[in-house]
Amino acid sequence: MSVVQRRQVSVQTEVEEATDGTTNTARIVKTTIRTIHWDDLPHWLRDNQHIHAGYRPASKSFVKSFKSLAYIHNETVNIYSHLLPALLSVPLSIAIYRAISPRYETASHADITAFGCFFAGAAFCLGMSSLYHTISNHSPLVAYIGNACDYVGIVGLIAGSFVPSVYYGFYCMPNLQVLYWSMICLLGLGCATVSTIPRFRTPAWRPFRATMFVSMGLSAVFPVIHGLVIFGFAQMRRQIGLWWLLLQGFLYILGAAIYAARVPERLWPGKFDIVGHSHQVFHLLVVLAACAHLTGLLEAFDYRHSGVAPACAG
């Protein structure tokens, strides 16, 4: 079977009626190709050869790229799996604030700031991700910039999740809070730098970029271990919602492993072009991980202000 015969191409046509005096004949005046096959992609749009069809052609237009929100292609799930949670994060944060702010007299603006950092980081990450996947077919330059924004969004999510966990984990130890917040800020700055400055975006710097992001992700281990040494497992389990943090880490690692292995599309090429390929699974697991982290924060908030947690000395 030839390449042309096996390509799955979706087209949209506009038909104009032309009158020749006696009969009406249909004349096609415009044909817009909506999705194309891997073989028809320009080199800069090729990423996963196990996904055969459903690609948007290069648009060279922001309007055309955003119009792709209205039809189905192989980026649709990637876009909406992060766009919808990003949009929902605003009303969700307001609803949670209204629900928990009057719950305890000891709750303060510091708690609002802590939760605000999480929601801001999550919304920023999910928003940048959905934006990148929407405009990634514009042009090589726009795809490059969008990809950098996507990585900076990841930095925002990690930092935004880190801040409230450290706040509740070392609630009575402001010096340790500042220490770990400073650490995550420096690592975040480093990751943002290697994600945006062209010199560090070259293949030669790929190992360094990977090391920076791995270091930032694993940095959460240090305050957790430190807290376990100081407070013990039983207290830390409730003080930072430890089980939920462990679930979050598991979901992130699982998502990254699936994304790196390109499963299931690598095992069944062409079968998961529109729904179910590894990048989409990764996106969904990121959202679930964020939900797990939020649940842990709510548990930590209740523990701190319900009167069960030990009072701060002095």
Image (tube, rainbow, N blue to C red):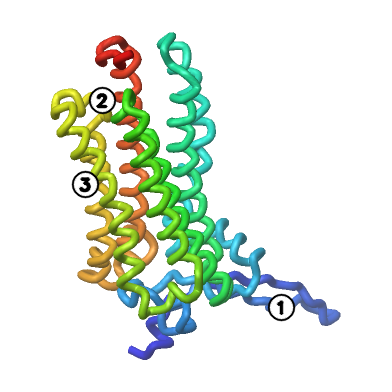
> Which residue is rendered at x = 27% and y = 73% of the image?
269
Task: Look at label 2 and name its amino acid.
Answer: Gln
Q: Earlier in the sequence, mark 3 or mark 1?
A: 1
Q: State which quarter of the image contains the N terminus.
A: bottom left
Q: Quadrant of residue 23?
A: bottom right
Q: Is residue 45 left or right of residue 283?
A: right
Q: Earlier in the sequence, mark 3 or mark 2?
A: 2
> What residue is disc 2 on?
239
Viewer-proximal residue, 175 or 237? 175
Residue 304, horizontal then vertical, whole percent = 32, 18
> Which residue is rendered at x = 46% and y = 37% of the image?
117
Q: Is residue 156 above or below residue 97?
A: below
Q: Nearer the viewer, mark 3 or mark 2?
A: 2
Q: Residues within 10 Å of mark 2 (few under 14, many from 20)?
A: many
Q: Is residue 43 left or right of residue 218?
A: right
How far is disc 3 from disc 2 in space, using C-alphas?
20 Å
> Which residue is rendered at x = 47% and y = 51% of the image?
80
Q: Residue furthest right?
A: 21
Q: Nearer the viewer, mark 3 or mark 1?
A: 3
Task: Look at label 1 and name its amino acid.
Answer: Val
Identify the disc placed on residue 29: 1
